[in-house]
């Protein structure tokens, strides 16, 4: 690929699509260890790109040419031993090139598209609205939100900053009768088109303590079920984390698995069975599916359990549009580079000096496993000897894949989300881009609160796909 050729420049992003397809095919083939291939491509691409950028080349073109050459280099590697040798050599060269810092020459890159909310006829009440990630998909797909709710004050402030005319109840939902929701929204039982929400999911999340619930009927889920019964919308959409599927009514201590089998309420899925019984009690026909946001165009691998319930009719789900496995009829997954390359110079939380030193051993797409053994021991401490892959420790995300699931802070020890090139965590603006928020969507609160609101949100690409499908269901098109 010749640098400076105007025809190449005009076709560069189309060429990137074919490179992505080749990259994902390489990762799916498992000819070589995936983690080391990812890091090798990351370090080779970074080294080549730095040279081109220093020579004044267009940043987009420099990355695409560098990725193409890095993929060609992988094709010439014979076995995992050669990959290991070349990777370690590349990391040494990469560290040396970063000795004076992790900045890159600033380029002029077009902004990514934004999903813009628009008002339409179909009516929605939104519960547990947060930063409005779920809501934005519906706003842009043929729905009008009549009323939103969240207990967090920064959620209210976020809605006020972006949708100042939207009615918002900023109270604990347990203090708000469904009749009050209907009165504020101006609807009677049976008149609302859609009730949406994601009841708080921390007890089910792998990022939390996974302590289980004493009874899901004592959780915010209880209120959502009550609202379905009393408001009687034509349909409801509820989202949760996949951990809900295996949740237990009673916590089963991890090390007890070596002593005995779980019983009764300790069995995996016991709490989920109760959730299904609660949904069954509404009289709605419902179904659920685990949907990966990356399969719907989000630049992030993030799975959510989505429930769709209908007062009348048979629920169904949208079909994926993207794939990381080269499936026919689907586009390649959207990458971090596509979504956030124009934000590399935004400010994110800084690494501590100690963590910055540890991360200097980790190229794009790598993690703690690439550190020298002595450095590894200092960085990981006791976690070095714990079970599991610990893939999130000292992780620098790759440019040319979707991001890992965004958590409520990029600086959690076991789920680091460090920029591919800069020695900092992902910024709030990058979080927004990877979650699909419009660029002008103003998240309010402290930096900790903004990370939390965005990290807890449903990716807008996924909510848009669900919303468009829900509109088709309500319109009788599916």
Image (cartoon, rainbow, N blue to C red):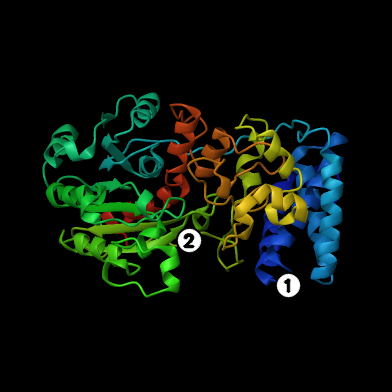
Numbered disc in front, either 2 or 1: 1
Which quadrant of the structure image shows residue 307?
bottom left
Indicate the position of residue 295 as horizontal and vertical percent values.
51, 58
Percent across and percent down for residue 352 are 66, 34
> Measured from the top left, where is residue 377 in percent x and y?
70, 52
Q: Residue at x 56, y 41 (%)?
A: 410
Q: Which of these two is toward me, 330 or 173? A: 173
Instruction: Give 117 or 129, whichever is nearer the viewer.
Output: 129
Quadrant in the picture for the C terminus: bottom left
Q: Seen in the image, is 219 located left or right of residue 18?
A: left
Q: Which one is nearer the viewer's eye here, 411 or 42?
A: 411
Could you say which disc has been placed on residue 195 in the image? none
- The image position of residue 18, as x and y in percent, is 70, 58
The dot on residue 31 is: 1
Could you tell me which secondary element the residue under label 1 belongs to? loop
Identify residue for label 2. Answer: 320
């Amino acid at each position: 690929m010749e640098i400076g050729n105007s025809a190449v420049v005009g076709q560069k992003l189309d060429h990137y699509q074919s490179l992505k397809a080749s990259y994902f095919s390489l990762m799916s083939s498992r000819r070589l260890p995936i983690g080391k291939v990812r890091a090798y491509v990351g370090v080779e691409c970074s080294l080549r790109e730095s040279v081109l950028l220093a020579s004044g080349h267009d940043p987009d073109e420099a990355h695409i040419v560098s990725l193409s050459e890095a993929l060609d280099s992988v094709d010439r590697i014979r076995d995992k031993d050669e990959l290991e040798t070349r990777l370690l050599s590349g990391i040494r060269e990469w560290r040396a090139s970063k000795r004076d810092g992790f900045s890159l020459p600033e380029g002029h890159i077009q902004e990514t598209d934004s999903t813009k909310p628009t008002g339409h006829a179909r009516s929605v009440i939104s519960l547990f609205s947060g930063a409005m990630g779920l809501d934005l998909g519906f706003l842009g797909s043929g729905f009008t939100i009549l009323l939103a709710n969240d207990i967090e004050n920064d959620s209210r402030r976020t809605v006020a900053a972006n949708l100042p005319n939207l009615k918002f109840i900023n109270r604990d939902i347990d203090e708000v009768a469904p009749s009050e929701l209907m009165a504020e929204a101006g609807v009677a039982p049976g008149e609302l088109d859609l009730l949406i929400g994601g009841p708080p999911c921390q007890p089910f999340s792998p990022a939390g303590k996974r302590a289980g619930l004493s009874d899901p009927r004592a959780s915010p889920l209880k209120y959502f079920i009550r609202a379905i019964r009393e408001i009687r919308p034509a349909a409801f959409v509820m989202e949760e984390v996949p951990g809900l599927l295996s949740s237990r009514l009673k916590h089963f201590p991890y090390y007890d698995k070596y002593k005995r089998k779980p019983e009764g309420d300790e069995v995996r899925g016991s709490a989920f069975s109760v959730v299904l019984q609660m949904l069954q009690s509404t009289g709605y026909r419902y179904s659920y599916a685990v949907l990966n946001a990356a399969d719907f165009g989000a630049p992030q691998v993030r799975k959510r359990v989505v429930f769709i319930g209908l007062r009348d009719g048979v629920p169904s789900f949208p079909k994926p549009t993207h794939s990381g496995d080269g499936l026919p009829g689907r586009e390649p997954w959207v990458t971090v580079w596509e979504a956030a390359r124009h934000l590399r110079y935004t400010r994110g939380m800084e690494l501590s000096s100690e963590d910055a030193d540890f991360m200097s051993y980790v190229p794009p797409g790598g993690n703690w496993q690439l550190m020298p053994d002595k450095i590894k021991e200092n960085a990981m401490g006791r976690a070095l000897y714990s079970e599991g892959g610990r893939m999130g420790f000292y992780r620098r995300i790759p440019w040319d894949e979707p991001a890992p699931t965004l958590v409520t802070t990029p600086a959690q020890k076991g789920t680091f989300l460090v920029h591919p090139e800069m020695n900092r965590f992902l910024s709030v603006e990058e979080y927004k881009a990877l979650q699909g928020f419009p660029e002008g969507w103003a998240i309010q609160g402290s930096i900790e609160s903004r990370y939390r609101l965005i990290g807890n949100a449903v990716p807008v690409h996924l909510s848009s796909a669900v919303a468009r499908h829900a509109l088709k269901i309500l319109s009788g098109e599916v």
